[in-house]
Image (cartoon, rainbow, N blue to C red):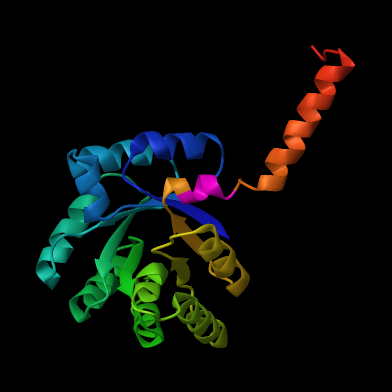
């Protein structure tokens, strides 16, 4: 499974990229608001840090607006992925962008039927939102499983399942077990995957025992 960093914080992205822990980046208007910098500047920096797909979301909700904004965003770098909402106009824009050779991430997916239409429109990625379904007492992982089964039923579908709205390490593990192609996570969640109390305890014991030997390695 590939990991994308779900953030517009360039410093976070750089740290994860240098460690070889991410394969791409996703951004959205809410993340850009937190970054409090011009969108184009942020995207240029991110694309300089990683050669993987970088999702850049359009702000327009009408077809003409999405096409205009998407084409402008695509000029920033060759690895820009245009992010469009899962609406009828969004799917039309997806089809157009794909015909122009630009990758597309169709976002705000909350049903398997929506995911099927996104694949039909040629989406490079479909982003089902796990956490937001959990918030309304539905199991977001059920949606990942449904999409996985449907896509696997039709080998010609090339759309990748990008598990989004990840809230915890368990979300990551479950998405991987189901077979999501990509998991996009906040930097804090990615870093938390390395944590385990027994690892900490074992390391503490090893360090303590090594000191008692009185030896040095270098």
Quarter holding the N terminus is bottom right
Name the chief secondary structure element in magenta.
helix
Find residue 49 and report its image quarter: top left
Camera-side residue: 63 or 21? 21
Residue 156 lies in the magenta stretch = no
Residue located at (26% from left, 44% from top): 76
Q: Is residue 176 left or right of residue 72?
A: right
Can see residue 24? yes
Q: Magenta region: which residues?
A: 189-193
Camera-side residue: 77 or 28? 28
Q: In this view, does 157 lie above or below 48?
A: below
Q: Position of residue 77 (x, y in %)?
A: 31, 45
Camera-side residue: 179 or 193? 193
Residue located at (54% from left, 62% from top): 172
Q: In this view, does 58 lie to the left or right of 162?
A: left
Residue 190 lies in the magenta stretch = yes
Q: Where is residue 94 in the image (x, y as percent from the top left)?
A: 28, 71
């Amino acid at each position: 499974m590939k990991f994308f960093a779900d953030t517009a914080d360039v410093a976070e992205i750089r740290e994860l990229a240098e460690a070889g822990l991410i394969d791409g980046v996703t951004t959205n208007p809410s993340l850009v608001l937190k970054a409090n910098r011009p969108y184009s500047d942020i995207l240029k920096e991110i694309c300089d840090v990683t050669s993987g797909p970088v999702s850049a979301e359009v702000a327009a909700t009408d077809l003409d607006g999405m096409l205009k904004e998407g084409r402008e965003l695509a000029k920033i770098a060759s690895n820009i992925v245009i992010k469009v909402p899962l609406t009828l106009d969004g799917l039309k824009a997806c089809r157009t962008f794909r015909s122009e050779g630009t990758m597309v991430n169709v976002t705000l997916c909350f049903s398997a039927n929506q995911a099927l239409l996104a694949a039909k429109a040629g989406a490079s990625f479909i982003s089902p939102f796990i956490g937001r379904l959990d918030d309304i007492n539905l199991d977001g992982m059920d949606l990942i499983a449904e999409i996985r089964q449907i896509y696997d039923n039709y080998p010609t579908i090339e759309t990748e399942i990008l598990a989004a709205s990840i809230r915890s390490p368990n979300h990551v593990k479950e998405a991987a077990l189901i077979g999501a192609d990509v998991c996009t996570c906040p930097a804090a969640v990615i870093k938390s995957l390395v944590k385990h109390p027994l690892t900490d305890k074992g390391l503490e014991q090893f360090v303590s025992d090594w000191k008692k030997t009185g030896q040095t390695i270098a």
